[in-house]
Image (tube, coloured by chain):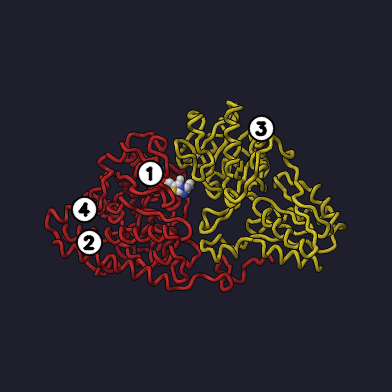
Amino acid sequence: MLQTAQRGKKTSANKAAPHERFLEAFRWMLLARTLEEKLVSLYRGGQITGGVYIGKGQEAVSVACGMFLQKGDIFAPLIRDQAGRSAFGEPIVDVARTYLGSRQGPMRGRDGNIHRGKPGDDQLAMISHLGAMVSVTVGALLAKRFRGEKNFVGLSCIGEGGMQTGSFHEGMNIAAVEQVPLVIVATNNHYAYSTPNDREFACADLVDRAKGYGFEGYSIDGTDLSMCLDVIGSAVKRARAGRPPQLVVASVLRLSGHGEHDDASYVTDEMKRQPFAQDCLKLTEKKVVDLEMADAATLKSWREDAARQVDEAIATAQKEAAPDAEKEDWCAISTRELVDRPE
Amino acid sequence: MSITYLEAIREAQARLLRDDERVFIYGQDVGGTFGGAFKATKGLAKEFPNRVLNTPISEDAIVGTAIGAAIKGMRPIVEMQFADFSSTALNQILNHAGTHYWRTNIPVPITIRLPSGGTKGSGPFHSQSMESIYAHYPGLIVMTPATVEDAYTMLIDAVAIDDPVVYCEHKYLYYHLKADKLPDKGLPTGRARIAREGRDLTIVTYSAMVQESLAVAGELARENLEIEVVDLRTVKPLDTDTVLASVARTGRLLCVGESFPWGGATAEVIARVTSEGFHLLDAAPVRINAKDTPIPYHPNLWSAHRPGAKMIAAKARALLKE
Ligand SMILES: Cc1ncc(C[n+]2csc(CCOP(=O)(O)OP(=O)(O)O)c2C)c(N)n1
Ligand SMILES: [Mg+2]
């Protein structure tokens, strides 16, 4: 069974043979897709309060973000990074608990859905405000440098929409000024909510910005898992080796609504016919079959394994208690004696 | 005909676009066939394709652009996708729009619409009420409509006003509130409204808490307790006269707001009443706000964090016994 990744303890993706790495990535993608399909069905059944945001079509890019990070590296995933979060080491029960509001989840019902993380385990907990995670990742890396740690990197994810915030721009600049070992993976899924690229930016290619910031930049086809692994893997390696910060821009189409409340009727048919609109999971599976990397029985067992893991995680979270307002401490600071009690 | 609070906001914008060529709407996802995250501009881009414009996710630049356009004769309406995201435009709103007239004698007629307040499951970044921050800074008018009628007429007034207006529309009211028809004109800007008359206790409130307070007044009326509910309508300017006149009638004051407890509109009302109308009070004034933590995601926590009818009723009863 595919276990939660144990960074640093197993042969890391950095060293694995390409086909092993490819298959491992495929299985994380499959797990992410299976989990998110389940979340969508729970949402439709009224069992999830608030929104559900999935990474359908972006699993290949995302998984590559998680796979090359080792113990001590910093990961700042965003809304469409289930595959990367799992590959990085987030147990899927954390996802189930956060979506279902379990008190035992990492967010304890205080925050929900994709707004989750475990900073203690180097997975930063995103806020909604786009662009804000870049400089925070830079700061986490600076701290490591101050403390004399070596051989670490940080990877921060962003969408092409979030790239247009002032916060993102300041974060990129400060990363380059500080020369921290940072990789930014920007996924252009061609929409920010309903807004297409032509109302988001007007440069020919977002990767051209790398030079202006003092980053090294690369473009990839986000539907091609091999390319995602090669390029993102190399960017992580370069950052780790002391090259300037790295920007990877991946092209995909968001294969879902912005959230599950959104029918995405604004996505044009022309857009759906573009090569980047293909489903990376299907392409990956086809490659596995065509190159005979795994036989049908193995594929079936992987799928069953993913389904079983998801069912277990959901069942666990469903059994757990919801938060109780009476038992909450309603305290937003850790220095409890300094809490202001207005009543 | 029945029209919701949300439809009133859309209708007001449609009328503004039709009546005044200087008006344009600027914000994320407001244009195209989409019409905004809450559909407050649905259909408007079809009629006015050049004046309902999608923007990048760049709040600071959105407001900056609107300020520049306003200085040069336009009447922009900015839609923030959620009030919470206006925090990334604070610099332009507070330091630029808020200071401009005072510094240069040139007013900045922009309207910034903030979909505000909590709804179940929205969590810390899609639930905030920011009126008190904006009211604290000089140079801004802060509207907090609580009815369908006010949502409509106040938005029209906001655009007509030559100064920057922060228009806080409550997401919880979007679909919950309905009216039969839209009025042509409302009360003047800055005038509070007596939403219900009573002689035993005054509740001063605004936005979604007006509805909660009216529900409490209805409930207590069955016990022969007469609650007067004052809807501030704008938290800045704050209609101290109407509030004082009400407290003069009742002698008891309860202030209810949905935002965080440190400072804010409720504290301001109490500060004014105690300093200007201390002699009118028969008991110490009381206020109710949200709790001093970020806004929780889980409905169990959210409904305890946000003031509601139950808490308002309990505090009102206790205050009436004082
Ligand atoms: C500063 C800020 N403004 C607005 C929003 C609301 N919002 C959430 S996601 C989103 C679109 C994001 O687009 P993109 O960055 O391309 O990511 P994608 O959803 O396409 O993965 C918007 C506008 C936000 N989260 N932060
Ligand atoms: Mg996008």
Name which residue type carries label 1.
Answer: Glu
Q: Chain of mark 2?
A: A
Which one is closest to the eye, mark 2 or mark 3?
3
Q: Which numbered marker is on residue A24?
A: 2
Give the letter of the yellow chain.
B
Q: Is mark 2 within 8 Å of ligand 1?
A: no
Q: Is residue B100 above or below residue B204?
A: above
Residue wearing tag 1: A160
Name which residue type carries label 3.
Answer: Ala
Give chain A's shade. red
Of residues A270 and B182, which is closer to you in this image?
B182
Q: Quadrant of the C terminus of chain A?
A: bottom right
Q: Is residue B88 left or right of residue B311?
A: left
For the residues labelled 1 and 3, the Cα–Cα distance comes to 36 Å
Residue wearing tag 4: A284
Name which residue type carries label 2.
Answer: Glu
Residue B18 visible within the image: yes
- Can you name the residue that lies furthest to the right here? B279
Of residues A332 and A80, which is closer to you in this image?
A80
Residue B79 picture location, percent across and down = 54, 41
Tag 3: Cα neighbours inside 10 Å, few (<14), some, or many (≥20)? some
Residue wearing tag 3: B160
For the residues labelled 2 and 3, the Cα–Cα distance comes to 61 Å
Q: Residue at x 59, y 36 (%)?
A: B11
> Label 2's element?
helix
Q: Residue at x 70, y 45 (%)?
A: B234
Residue A172 visible within the image: no
Q: Residue at x 54, y 71 (%)?
A: A324
